[in-house]
Amino acid sequence: MGDVLVVAEHEENRIHPITFELLGKANELSKKLNGKVRAVILGRGVRDIANELVYYGADTVHVYDNESLRFFNVLLYKENIVSLIKKFSLDLVLIGATNKGRSLAPRIAASLKTGLTADCIDIFVEKGKIIQVRPAFTGNIIAHIYTKTRPVLTTIRYRVMKPLKKDEKRKGEIIVEDLKFSNSKGLKVLGKIRDKEVRISDADIIVSFGRGVKRRDDIKMIKELADLLGGVVGASRPVVDEGWISKDHQIGFSGNTVRPRLYMAFGISGSPQHLAGMKDSEIVIAVNIDSSAPIFRYSDYCIVADLYHVIPNLIRRLKKIGGSNG
Ligand SMILES: Cc1cc2nc3c(=O)[nH]c(=O)nc-3n(C[C@H](O)[C@H](O)[C@H](O)COP(=O)(O)OP(=O)(O)OC[C@H]3O[C@@H](n4cnc5c(N)ncnc54)[C@H](O)[C@@H]3O)c2cc1C
């Protein structure tokens, strides 16, 4: 048994909070495994933010700071992380179940010929065994998974674990590593098209829509309502699959888990897969023409009505009282 590696995630050198959650968990696990907490961070200029990882629980931070890591290059990340895992014969690797993590983790697993347990909601050590916990069969059972191959590779959902309190007095070792495989063939990132960053899991107010919305163009009114309320647009999977909105907005089992103060569901039936992502919202308001829609069983306010009637009315009223400023 040994050290636990956390793969740190950042966006233009701002560390994603999931990294702190993973470090908190790694701290707990490493004590049981008699190892220490290692973190790895790759990017350009990331040496300057490596200490943050120590403050949140890393004992050692491996830093790959290189111009060719300016953009997230999944192959370059994979090659270097795999080499690090091999060098220290690491037993357990924690990665965030974010878009980047979900793209990176399977590649690392395939390279190391080990298993991957994706989208975990917990992980613990029992009688020396690492047990990974995740919903299975679309959330109907909670599976406890024991992986025989090493390392154990896990992606963990955002906002299911608690970070440690930041401690700026905490000391750790920072090791600047040489980037290997910088000529990695197969993928060349030419640049990045900047899209407005959506971090739906952090939103307090979410205005979600599903297949009850008939035309792509109607998303404009959903957006207008979300803006007036100071919220973010969410979506069920079918409308994401249609290409009407990006996957960053998808709520549910194969999308994001959210816990907003207010969740509004327009034309969403409430499938178990959708509920899996939003059932812990504080207040749920659902609008559906079908009074037997399952979403109503999880709603605080149930409005049996046509969304094409409710939304324009709401927008009109909110504009009258001054939207999110009113
Ligand atoms: C492995 C797996 C993973 C999945 N992951 C996800 C996931 O992450 N997220 C997710 O959402 N789904 C997921 N799904 C899909 C899921 O099973 C459902 O198909 C999906 O959630 C249904 O989306 P919906 O509610 O928008 O559509 P529907 O189920 O078709 O519901 C549309 C609703 O709109 C109502 N409606 C219609 N017209 C109006 C109107 N004018 N005004 C008001 N209401 C109206 C209808 O009464 C109906 O209730 C997954 C499925 C699988 C198999």
Image (cartoon, helix red, strand yellow):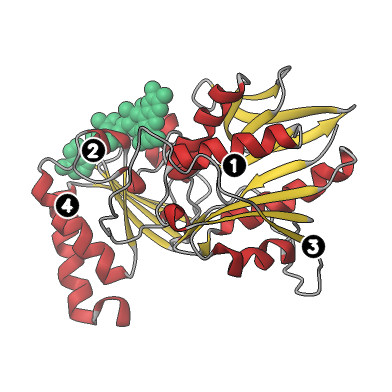
Disc 3 on helix, strand or loop? loop
Instruction: Give residue 325's position: percent from left, percent from top.
Output: 31, 82
- Name the amino acid, label 3: Gly
Q: Single out the mark in the foreground, 4 or 1.
A: 1
Instruction: Give residue 92's position: percent from left, percent from top.
Output: 72, 34
Pointer 4 residue: 219
Residue 30 in which image quadrant? top right
**Callout 4 crowding tier (Cα within 10 Å): few <14, some 14–19, many ≥20:** some
Q: Single out the mark in the foreground, 3 or 2.
A: 3
- Determine contact: label 4, label 1, CB under 8 Å: no
Residue 132 in which image quadrant? top right
Pointer 3 residue: 172
Determine if the C-beta at disc 2 is less than 8 A from ligand 1. yes
Disc 4 on helix, strand or loop? helix
* Disc 3 from disc 4: Cα separation: 48 Å
Task: Tell me which residue sits at (23%, 63%) in the image.
Answer: 225
Instruction: Give residue 20's position: percent from left, percent from top.
Output: 65, 57
